[in-house]
Amino acid sequence: MSISDEFAFIKEIQPDRLFHEEKIVGIGDDAAIIGMEEGFEKIVCVDTMVEDVHFTRKTMSPFDIGYKSLAANISDVAAMGGIPLYYLVSITIPKHWEQKDLKEIYKGMKALGDKHKMDLIGGDTTSGKVLVVSVFVIGKVEQGKRLLRSNAQQGDVVFVSGTLGNAAGGLDILLHNNEPSLFLVEHHQRPTPQVELGRILSKFERVALNDVSDGLSSELLEIAESSKVDIFVKKEIIPVSKELTRYNDEKAFHWGMTGGEDFELVGTISADGWPELAEECRKAGIQITRIGNVRHGSGQLYLESETGVQQIQKEGYNHFNRR
Amino acid sequence: MSISDEFAFIKEIQPDRLFHEEKIVGIGDDAAIIGMEEGFEKIVCVDTMVEDVHFTRKTMSPFDIGYKSLAANISDVAAMGGIPLYYLVSITIPKHWEQKDLKEIYKGMKALGDKHKMDLIGGDTTSGKVLVVSVFVIGKVEQGKRLLRSNAQQGDVVFVSGTLGNAAGGLDILLHNNEPSLFLVEHHQRPTPQVELGRILSKFERVALNDVSDGLSSELLEIAESSKVDIFVKKEIIPVSKELTRYNDEKAFHWGMTGGEDFELVGTISADGWPELAEECRKAGIQITRIGNVRHGSGQLYLESETGVQQIQKEGYNHFNRR
């Protein structure tokens, strides 16, 4: 750690302009004050990335670490149908990290934050043995709007955005020094949170929604359990990219079901609402796929294929089981 | 780390009741949604504690770690004149920490959180080499109320609450295995944020305010710099406790000026407002001391004593310089 003065570093990473200047005060004070907005409620979430657990210097550049740690949080806001507004960063810095690399982390966050007109409004800087980046995001959503995972009902259509497993494929390439697919590697290093789709979904009456952070099967099981329903998905329809099957056709489906960190949105909507949602997404250029349906049940997930029906157990990403 | 399942641990630490149940949804979902309140704005802040930097197993019990990490944040809300409402916890857990100790951390937070009717509404759990506890707190304050450190003006009275240096004295006892003073040790391990005083101060027209997290001289310099004024304090009036002078008379004043982590409130108020503030504090049983005044200047801090006037440079707690 080559920083001789915490205060000087904090000054360096402070933004020189604010998107929501009229709504915020107190940046650099004890705490920030954020104004209220008529008709909106606030969304809050936190996500932490740890060196040698969520990334290594080999798999992620400092810029990527910043970008992805903010992306994971924006994705949580998207999964509530909201608009991200502000972020605070708590960073624990080990001695072996140089100041120029630390600045790159904040640049990575700023690059994605700027796309969403988000302001960095606070944080904390501490020293420690490994790099830990905790990002806290505040967003807003229309008052009373609840895109909860407990909203699924019998008869609903199950949908997912984009293609799945790309981030897992990208990580596999990086870990094994395989021939790079820029498409897959970028999905791992700089994932795109689906804010626009979340906003489209927020206009519908009743939607159950999760972002794919722990893997499709894990997210679907959460929706099934929270909503006390059974979910059936069709194996042949789970969307995986050509890039992924080209890289590893054998593992593509497995990564699609369990890979995690794709930050696509998965959820359920009434059968009546589905055609309108599909049309809205078509107009916005957002890929969305109907992958199954919701039935009366008790929180189970089933995979239907040509060979029969298979029950899926929880097997998504779990920090402690994996290491 | 004996936790075999992150999800099971999260369930264990989830609160079984909520103080603000009608205002929050989404706990355990992708993010929490917090309701707006007519006439109030939100306050947000973050504070992180790292094992072997901010504490060791020798100086702090797991319960204390939880208690203090929340206290530091509540203190920031108090320094904005606000009411703490919610907290989110991101914890990075090393293998050598046992589950029963981790639960103690959350119990420590809950003990203090309950006193302030605060709800735990989210978090993240990751593994890592050292224990890192990041707490994000959300509070509220009346719309337009700004207790900023830039509010000081020439002619103001400088005040501080309680007595200073107790936390530093308590730490010194713990580090050197000296005969314990429960009073001093408790000030280090379970400091009391001054929310009630912050609320009293929020009723006054114009107040500059900081909490004493980095040491009195550092906080006063921040106010002087932000407000572009000079601050003069009288050495003989800086309030230190009998317990501190009894423990180490020689160092008591030094700890009082630079110790940090006392979480008292220091600030300035107009000379007209001071008598009313003093009276309000007397009625509420809160110790408050007039320690100096604000003069025209350029951000300097001066200490007046019988032997003359001395300029004080920044020398408060700085994570990187100290270690």
Image (cartoon, coloured by chain):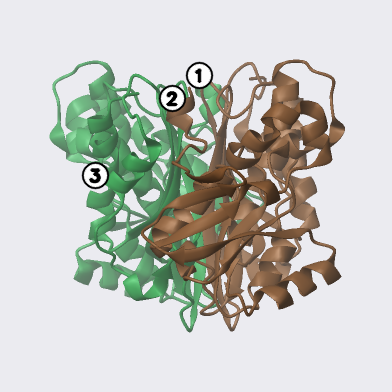
Chain colours: A green, B brown
Residue B183 in the image: state x and y as whole percent: 84, 37
The disc labelled 3 sits on which kind of residue? Lys
Dot 3 corresponds to which residue?
A107
Q: Is residue B111 visible from the viewing direction of this image?
A: yes
Residue B48 in the image: state x and y as whole percent: 54, 39
Q: Nearer the viewer, residue A171 or A280?
A: A171
Q: Residues within 10 Å of mark 2 (few under 14, many from 20)?
A: some
Please name which of the two marks, 2 or 3, marks the residue nearer to the observer. Answer: 3
Chain for mark 3?
A
- Picture disc at residue B298: none
Dot 1 corresponds to which residue?
A323
Q: Is residue A220 visible from the viewing direction of this image?
A: no
Asked where in the image residue A60 lies, by quadrant, the reply is top left
The disc labelled 2 sits on which kind of residue? Val
Secondary element at image label 1? loop
Please name which of the two marks, 1 or 3, marks the residue nearer to the observer. Answer: 3
Rendered residue at 80%/56% (across/down): B115
Q: Are marks 1 and 3 on the same chain?
A: yes
- Picture disc at residue A53: 2
Marks 1 and 3 sit apart, C-alpha to C-alpha, by 30 Å
